[in-house]
Image (cartoon, rainbow, N blue to C red):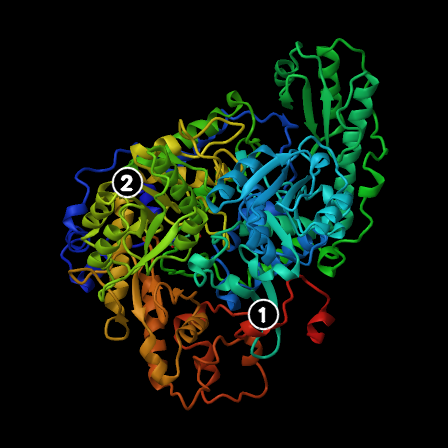
Amino acid sequence: MKTDVFALRHIGPREAHCNEMLQVVGATSIEALISETVPDNIRLQSPLNLEAPLSEQEYLEHIHQLASKNKVFKSYIGMGYYPSNLPAVIQRNILENPGWYTAYTPYQAEIAQGRLEALLNYQTMISDLTGMELANASLLDESTAAAEAMALLFAVRPKPQAKAGTVKFFVSDEVLPQTLSVLKTRATPIGIELVLGAVDDFDFSSEFFGALLQYPGKSGVIMELQPFISKANENDIKVAVAADILSLVALEAPGKFGADVVVGTTQRFGIPMGYGGPHAAYFATKEAYKRFIPGRIIGVTKDMDGNRAMRMALQTREQHIKRDRATSNICTAQVLLAVMAGMYAVYHGPKGLKYIANKVHNTATTLADALENLEFNLVHNSFFDTIQVRIPENIDLKTKAEQKEVNFYYPDATTVSISINETTTLSDLNLILSIFAEVYSKETTQIETLSSNIRIPEAAQRHSDFMTNVIFNSHHSETELMRYIKRLERKDLSLNFSMISLGSCTMKLNAAVEMLPLSWPNWGNIHPFAPLNQVEGYRTMLAKLEEQLTEITGFAGTSLQPNSGAQGEFAGLMVIRAYHKSRGDAHRKICIIPSSAHGTNPASAVMAGMKVVVTKSSENGNIDVEDLREKATLHKDNLAALMVTYPSTHGVYESAIKEITQIIHDNGGQVYMDGANMNAQVGLTNPGNIGADVCHLNLHKTFAIPHGGGGPGVGPICVAKQLTPFLPGNPLIETGGTDAIDSISGAPFGSSLACLISYGYIKMLGAKGLTDSTEIAILNANYIKERLQGHYDTLYSGERGRAAHEMIIDCRDFKANGIEVVDIAKRLMDFGFHAPTVSFPVAGTMMIEPTESEGKAEMDRFCDAMIAIRKEIEAASKDQPNNPLKNAPHTQEMLTKDVWEFPYSRAVAAFPLNYIKEDKFWPSVRRVDDAYGDRNLICTCAPIEAYEEA
Ligand SMILES: *Cc1c(COP(=O)(O)O)cnc(C)c1O
């Protein structure tokens, strides 16, 4: 047998185990199980048409070769992306460490205190640098964050403004072009009118509810915020500022001037450019808007014993609740990147950041002086890091610069823009000068030292303190930081400890070989707006990935731009909207969504300007076809789309799916398939085959990108032929359809660097490995279903009694014994497991999805744990709430107390099954008190006294 086959490493169960499991589930073969599970009428007739799979070694050689086709030039392009130095200690201990990158979103706070603390550091850093009261734990990119700021200001308009129909939003002409494009996408469907102009010409008329400024502007100019914001506030116009994070070290915080929202990216805090992403965007605002903040906020609270503990605060714990009343659809964000940027701040501290910012500024000043000495004129005399230089029209600077492997940015024929960054050295400066001297035939001398002139206007210079907290002033040696990172890591349960069987989230293996290339400079150090002839490796990889995904989904085209599944939903619906509009059907705005849908579905539909009509589920968990037909017919003149998850969020392949898609088409609508459950389809069926028109894929679920503790995500959309013309574009790099909608993300291909992971996944598995993965995922789910039989009721199953790739167990009856589903979730921690998905899509249930990567032994341990817990539930009683379930999780601290006052033994508390003795995971806090923290909102690492007072 060939053993250098990647599929053997990716798929958990060995052949002998598969046979044992098949026996347990009562199927004669995998093929038999699959045909009992997946309806015949939707099965693919032929295998996927993909290239032959590569072994790990072959893949590394292949991807290395592709990498060599990317040219790493010195990048002075700026425009929101900068080279930066990723400290090796962060690269090795976070980016390259499965303890960090395989973690899930910290819903189970007791086993997530490490990343929660890292994110709290991030929020504190953002609050401090921006001068705002509250910051969230990241957004997808700067452009999306700006659009979220606009949406927030629109949502919080004062009543008189809303009554008067005030819809205008002013956008400074200094705002980055990719941000403007994302703003347009977001503004149009909800009726916001963008007005682009120079800040000096703005008349502050009452027709505006808000404004967006860029600080410093794209031309490098540093505008005076104070007068603008004061005047705006006098006229009830709220102001958002998109600010460069490094510049805020040297420039006074926008919050000090009264900004309402401050957004930006933290990419230049040690995150590789990666041809556009992933990077963590930040979002900071006033406490007054806390209920409207998009994404997740980490807050401090206490646990059952009164110890300090962190968890996701406010509405951000449960993003499904708001559904179509949500003002944002953010679910997956950029946690891993936020953790890294936060650690960069911890490592450098305020002094280190000042050193870096000053060096960048001094380098820019030195260059400006030297160019002025050569009689060049600058567009702006003051700046932070970006200088624009007037150049004669007919002399070719660009070619010469590129010969010297230098990229500048050329906003027009007579201007060159040069953005200095953390990595720029004296010899880089001299190279830039020598290029100018050569092209324009001037004499220049070597620069030996940096100037210390400051070219930041007096009024804009920073005087306020930042990052005074002890956390930013302690870990400045590598030993200290390494241990701090390890200390946090040990508090978190990740895939390198045990199975995380989260239904709908597909926590499968993130293979090391898929991750390796992310650390290579030829993938990391590439600017998204670099000239095309320098990025052949990226373009080949991305085009191939699009092709692979198009084939897998059975569609005609793919856009990799959306940075999460929810952004994919928004993108797909916007494409549908454009399609209807192109046919004179702009009035088609009804979007039918089943009641069982993920909360992001209705939220995205509302963002796309659609009206949500909810359709029921039948008793067996399927879409109620007759109810759907009725609603589709009723709305046939205005029907835009159906959003449907397949297999359903109930974990069932509905055989009526083709009928369902036909009903929608017959009534003039398009079918949007939520592809979160694609792990149950790949190679067996596909969205094209079931009659959908567009789907998103969560590459961070089905296609092996790690969850990173809640991001990065990649949410490409794949579309049928009629929708391809509308795939999203980019204002600077040509991409998307012939009639492209505006951008969904700032970068032309979204998070290109993360796309490498999915590319490798598909390349190494090939058609057979992918299909085998789907089949084993189904086998594994059915095995767990069978093993839990008699202990837990499975809520729904297919026509022949089979689960799909996930299954729901009903825990609602345990209420009679005083046990809630969260008690089971917390008790699982004592057994070393992360809970399955809790209360989605049905309250009081758990949804279990093991994925193909888990082997039989691990699933057996999990089932043993669940069965042991079931016995504890049996023994529990409403009148005796002092039991191991209600008290879970149990910490080392409580176990080792001299007094033990519980009616069960310490061994039952901590070692309820034998396997746990060998490898115990200790939750670092006891059950956290969510409500307490919401009443006493603290979202920064305030000094310890603050908690005591609260
Ligand atoms: C995960 C998920 C989403 C949202 O995807 P994100 O990448 O988190 O934005 C949407 N629908 C379903 C069914 C999901 O499971």
Q: Residue at x 49, y 52 (%)?
A: 330
Q: Dot 2 corresponds to which residue?
A: 2
Observer-nearest residue: 537 or 793? Answer: 793
46 over 443 or under it: above or below? below
Tag 1 or tag 2, which sits nearer the N-term?
Answer: 2
- In the displayed structure, does residue 272 sit left or right of residue 130? left
- Residue 665 point in image, percent of width and height: 24, 43
Location of residue 722 by image quarter: top left
Q: Specify whether 287 is left or right of 567.
A: right
Can residue 757 be seen in the rendering of this structure?
yes
The quarter of the picture where residue 588 lies is top left
In this rendering, the answer to whether 294 lies above or below 886 is above
Q: Residue 121 in the image: x percent, y percent?
A: 65, 57
Q: Please identify the residue farthest to the front as the structure is shown.
A: 164
**Marks 2, 1: nearer the viewer:** 1
Closer-to-camera residue (179/142): 179
Give the residue type that dot 2 points to: Lys
Q: Are marks 2 and 1 in contact (CB under 8 Å)?
A: no
Q: Which mark is residue 756?
A: none
| Disc 1: CA contacts within 10 A as few (<14), some (14-19) or many (>=20) | some
Label 1 near ligand 1 (CB < 8 Å): no
Position of residue 693 in the picture relative to residue 160 (left or right): left
**Mark pair 2, 1: CA separation:** 56 Å
- Mark 2 lies on a secondary structure that is loop
Q: Which residue is mark 1?
A: 934
Q: Amino acid at mark 1?
A: Asp
User: Where's residue 530, x and y in %?
Assistant: 56, 26
Q: Secondary structure at mark 1?
A: helix
